[in-house]
């Protein structure tokens, strides 16, 4: 018996066990309707205020022409930037629809730069309780945040992936790689792996408009074969961890759709496989997502990760009071 037993603050024991077993957990109505509406409204205001004229027309491509977007993407960790849907940009490089219907996502510093998103992410007691209940307590920090718009008709598919690593892409069609590029910012590697995704539905998410689905339990077995890194010569690329001929089998099974109502929050283990289909419906599917990791000395953040803290904007702490276990013994 441990000498102290932590009391759960928000989750039930069943929910904690479900998260450990499945690698994800939906918390219905985590945000109040008012807070959810405030995030949705703010997202729409941001889309309104964005100007396309000075945008580098970042499209998520994996061919030689992706460098135009590299800098805009790689320096977005502490800014509010707009990443476009590939299908929204015509061959002439111009938008083929209104700008608020052309944005794939807004990121990646909303939790730092915008008070409405900051409140939900960093000034939220219920969020802190959930994080403590999951024993994610080695001084967790928020890394990056985004509003994912999933635009009607063109909202891109997010193929099977997990957030801590890039897992075998060999079976993915080249056209899907472009969407993977859009999500590369989520591939955040720590040693040991600690990434936790927090995903909040701002609108109703169903099978019609590209709700998330998960392969339950895959966080326990998914092989880690590649990771997405910043290259020493600039730009980004993949580092092979296990060559394809030696890679263990990819787990297979039935993906389960996690339909959500506005305000529902889904916790996503960094190693669980998940995906979402293209949104072919006439409705948007706005969601707010951010990721956190644990800190040294428990976990080391890899300096090859695409997202790096800067002196001006270190990763912000999630917990007001860091867990005593994270205080260095010599301090
Ligand atoms: O919202 C989506 O469709 C994908 C989100 C995702 O994969 C993530 O937040 O890690
Ligand atoms: Fe993800």
Image: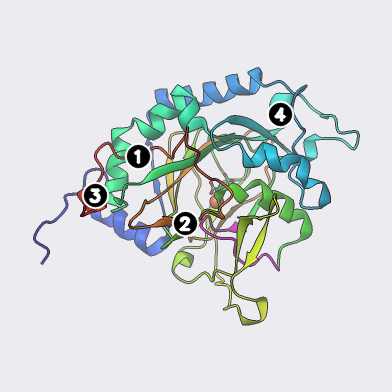
Q: Which mark is residue 318?
A: 1
CB within 8 Å, label 3 to label 1: no
- Real-space Cα distance between discs 4 and 2? 30 Å
Res. 146 image quadrant: top right
For mark 2, what is the residue? Answer: 270
Q: In the drawing, does residue 175 fall left or right of residue 309?
A: right
Element carrying mark 1: loop
| Mark 1 closeness class: few <14, some 14–19, many ≥20 residues within 10 Å | many
* Percent of width and height locating residue 3: 8, 61
Element carrying mark 3: loop
| Dominant secondary structure, magenta | loop
Identify which residue, 3 or 312, lies in the foreground. Answer: 312
* Percent of width and height locating residue 23: 42, 59
Reading the chain from its start, which is encountered first: label 2 or label 1? Answer: 2
Q: Which mark is residue 101?
A: 4
Name the quarter where the N terminus is drawn: bottom left
Q: Residue at x 67, y 64 (%)?
A: 169
Q: Which stretch is magenta?
A: 160-170
């Amino acid at each position: 018996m441990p000498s102290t037993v932590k009391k759960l603050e928000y989750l039930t024991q069943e929910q904690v066990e479900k998260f450990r077993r499945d690698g994800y957990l939906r918390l219905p109505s985590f945000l109040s309707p008012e807070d959810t509406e405030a995030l949705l409204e703010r997202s729409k205001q941001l889309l309104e205020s964005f100007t396309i004229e000075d945008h580098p027309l970042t499209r998520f491509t994996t061919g030689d022409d992706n460098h135009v977007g590299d800098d805009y993407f790689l320096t977005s960790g502490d800014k509010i930037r707009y990443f476009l849907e590939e299908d929204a940009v015509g061959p002439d490089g111009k938008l083929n629809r209104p700008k608020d219907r052309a944005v794939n996502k807004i990121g990646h510093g909303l939790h730092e730069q915008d008070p409405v998103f900051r409140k939900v992410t960093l000034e939220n007691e219920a969020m802190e309780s959930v994080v403590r209940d999951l024993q994610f307590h080695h001084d967790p920090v928020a890394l990056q945040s985004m509003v994912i718009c999933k635009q009607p008709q063109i909202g891109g598919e997010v193929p099977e992936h997990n957030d801590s690593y890039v897992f075998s892409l060999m079976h993915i069609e080249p056209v899907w790689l472009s969407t993977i590029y859009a999500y590369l910012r989520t591939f955040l590697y720590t040693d040991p792996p600690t990434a936790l995704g927090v995903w909040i539905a701002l609108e109703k998410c169903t099978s019609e408009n590209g709700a998330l689905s998960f392969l339950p339990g895959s966080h326990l077995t998914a092989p880690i074969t590649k990771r997405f890194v910043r290259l020493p010569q600039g730009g980004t690329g993949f580092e092979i961890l296990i060559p394809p001929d030696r890679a263990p089998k990819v787990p297979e099974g039935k993906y389960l759709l996690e339909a959500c109502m506005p305000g529902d929050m889904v916790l996503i283990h960094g190693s669980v496989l998940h995906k979402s289909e293209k949104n072919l419906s006439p409705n948007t599917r706005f969601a707010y997502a951010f990721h956190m990791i644990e800190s040294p000395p428990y976990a080391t953040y890899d300096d090859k990760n695409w997202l790096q803290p800067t002196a001006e904007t270190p990763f912000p702490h999630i917990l007001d009071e860091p867990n005593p276990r994270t205080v260095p013994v010599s301090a």
